[in-house]
Image (tube, rainbow, N blue to C red):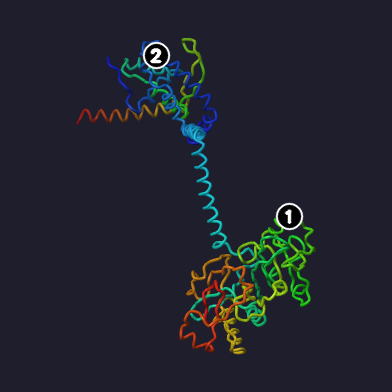
């Protein structure tokens, strides 16, 4: 199956969503999104790390050092309470827009 | 509240951005390592430095790093081409210096009023001829006549500049001959010794005395306070130094004076000078202090009346057509630029010619042709010519 880039604006939502299940390091976040999208969505470093920095800046995620599955010291990102709220808000917003797009596609 | 927290996080990041940057570098390296293990080709990694920088940009401080990089780069480049650097610095320094100096002069000449006591009631008296020409000085006897008769003026200050030989110095020194009330009236104080006072220094048998300007005293006499009370030679005559002016007292001519001398003692120091008795020349600069309640307009009206009276007393006297008063600025400007149409309030101080006080004005039949209207008001054959550097004035 061909790999696809990320629709704009959706990356933060997806990162927040995969962090909802527990803390993850950057590579694991990209992998999780890749897997869960049935290998359709490919998250490049060039967009993943700026997005993670933005999450830290906004206070939606916090970073802490941990040990990876390959025994490397690496930063894990954890969803904060504010991030939880943001996730809910972004899901609502996504559904609203998705619904609108669907309506257009069905009736036009 | 959210914005404040975000700002705090940004501020903390700014302080700890080096360790943040190292952490980011480490985790991106880890990311590439894992991707390579998973079989991703190395060529797909892209420019790692650029990727790191794009990530850091989220914090909004990269401009600081870039600024310092630019500064370092600029410094290196300048260091490598010292010739260019030195010429650029010199050109900038000269350009800035010229601008600052020009503004300082403009500020001093136009924007600031005189740094003397109550400059608002000080008037410069000038003569204006029938055809509108203005002369900066007037004869000393006229100034004395105004001093003795004008009620709108509480005091008259007279000044005349000159150059005198001091001891055996090669260069003659700038001196100002001033009426002995000059310092008191302008609120000047002495750094050492005393300044002039009319009872002491106007007496007919008074000793020859001088006051030194602060800056001249510093450079010529090495700021020695013991000079007060000593005798120095001016034009080969012994005069006693009685005091030093305070540092910031500039007088009325816009520059610092080396030596101040009571104007009454001028004939003793300058042999043959008739400055104090010459009734025709524009020998001395005259300033008036408005009496309480008087205005420049009322003073001008009174002085005009007094001028008429003098003319009646001595019809052969070559007198001013009109006395003109205006408020002082410490400007030196071109008399031709004066706005004579502004109803008598000119903002002008005449440029002081250092030799003017020593030169006897000439009376001559030669001169520009006068207007028949003005000529008719004077005894035939009488013309006055002002000192050569001023426009010719026919009364």
Q: Secondary structure at mark 2?
A: helix
Q: Quadrant of residue B194?
A: bottom right
Does residue B117 appear to the left or right of B191 in the view shown?
left
Please give the chain letter of the residue carrying mark 1: B
Give percent across and percent down for residue A59: 47, 28
Q: Residue at x 54, y 86 (%)?
A: B382
Image vertical order of residue A89 relative to residue B170, above or below: above
Task: List the residue tagged with mark 1.
Answer: B222
Residue A93 versus residue B131: which sits nearer the camera?
B131
Image vertical order of residue B41 relative to residue B47, above or below: above
Task: List the residue tagged with mark 2.
Answer: B35
Viewer can see residue B176: yes
Residue B51 versus residue B87: which sits nearer the camera?
B87
Image vertical order of residue B58 relative to residue B377, above or below: above
Q: Residue at x 60, y 87 (%)?
A: B309
- In the picture, the disc for residue A88 is none
Q: First in sequence: mark 1 or mark 2? A: 2
Q: CA–CA distance between discs 1 and 2?
A: 82 Å
Q: Are marks 1 and 2 in contact (CB under 8 Å)?
A: no
Image vertical order of residue A35 relative to residue B63, above or below: above
Viewer can see residue B242: no
Mark nearest the camera among 1 and 2 is 1
Q: Secondary structure at mark 1?
A: loop
Give percent across and percent down for residue B115: 63, 63
Give percent across and percent down for residue B324: 55, 77
Give percent across and percent down for residue B174: 66, 64
Around disc 2, counting alpha carbons within 10 Å, would you say few (fewer than 14), some (14 to 19), or many (20 or more)? some
Q: Quadrant of residue B126?
A: bottom right
Residue A93 versus residue B173: which sits nearer the camera?
B173
Please give the chain letter of the residue carrying mark 2: B
């Amino acid at each position: 199956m061909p790999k696809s880039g990320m629709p704009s604006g959706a990356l933060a939502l997806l990162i927040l969503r995969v962090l909802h299940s527990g803390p993850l390091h950057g590579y694991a976040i990209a992998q999780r999104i890749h897997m869960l999208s049935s290998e359709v969505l490919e998250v490049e470093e060039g967009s993943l790390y700026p997005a993670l920095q933005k999450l830290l800046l906004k206070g939606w995620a916090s970073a802490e050092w941990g040990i990876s599955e390959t025994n490397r010291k690496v930063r894990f990102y954890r969803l904060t309470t504010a991030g939880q709220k943001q996730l809910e808000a972004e899901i609502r917003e996504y559904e609203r827009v998705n619904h609108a797009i669907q309506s257009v596609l069905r009736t036009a | 509240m959210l914005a404040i927290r975000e700002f705090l996080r940004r501020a903390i990041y700014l302080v700890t951005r080096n360790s943040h940057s190292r952490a980011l570098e480490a985790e991106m390296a880890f990311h590439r390592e894992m991707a390579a293990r998973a079989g991703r080709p190395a060529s797909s990694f892209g420019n790692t430095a650029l990727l790191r920088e794009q990530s850091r940009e989220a914090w909004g401080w990269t401009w600081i790093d870039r600024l310092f990089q630019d500064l370092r780069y600029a410094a290196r480049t300048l260091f490598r081409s010292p010739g260019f650097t030195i010429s650029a610095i010199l050109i900038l320094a000269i350009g800035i210096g010229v601008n600052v100096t020009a503004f300082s002069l403009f500020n001093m000449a136009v924007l600031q009023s005189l740094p003397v006591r109550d400059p608002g009631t000080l008037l410069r008296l000038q003569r204006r001829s029938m055809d509108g020409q203005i002369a900066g000085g007037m004869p000393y006897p006229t100034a004395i006549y105004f001093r003795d008769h004008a009620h709108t003026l509480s005091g008259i200050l007279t000044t005349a500049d000159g150059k005198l030989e001091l001891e055996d110095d090669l260069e003659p020194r700038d001196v100002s001959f001033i009426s002995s009330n000059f310092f008191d009236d302008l609120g000047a104080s002495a750094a050492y010794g005393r300044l002039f006072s009319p009872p002491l220094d106007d007496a007919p048998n008074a000793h020859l005395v001088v006051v030194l300007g602060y800056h001249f005293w510093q450079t010529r006499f090495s700021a020695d306070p013991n000079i007060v009370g000593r005798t120095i030679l001016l034009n080969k005559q012994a005069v006693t130094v009685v005091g030093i002016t305070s540092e910031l007292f500039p007088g009325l001519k816009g520059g610092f004076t080396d030596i101040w001398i009571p104007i009454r003692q001028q004939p003793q120091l300058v042999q043959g000078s008739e400055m104090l008795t010459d009734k025709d020349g524009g020998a001395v600069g005259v300033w008036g202090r408005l009496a309480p309640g008087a205005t420049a307009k009322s003073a001008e009206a009174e002085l005009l009346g007094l001028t008429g009276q003098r003319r009646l007393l001595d019809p052969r006297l070559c007198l001013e057509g009109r006395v003109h008063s205006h408020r002082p600025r410490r400007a030196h400007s071109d008399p031709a630029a004066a706005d004579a149409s502004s109803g008598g309030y000119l903002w002008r101080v005449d440029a002081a010619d250092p030799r003017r006080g020593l030169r006897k004005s000439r009376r001559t039949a030669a001169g520009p042709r006068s207007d028949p209207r003005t000529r008719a008001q004077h005894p035939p054959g009488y013309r006055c010519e002002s000192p050569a550097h001023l426009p010719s004035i026919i009364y």
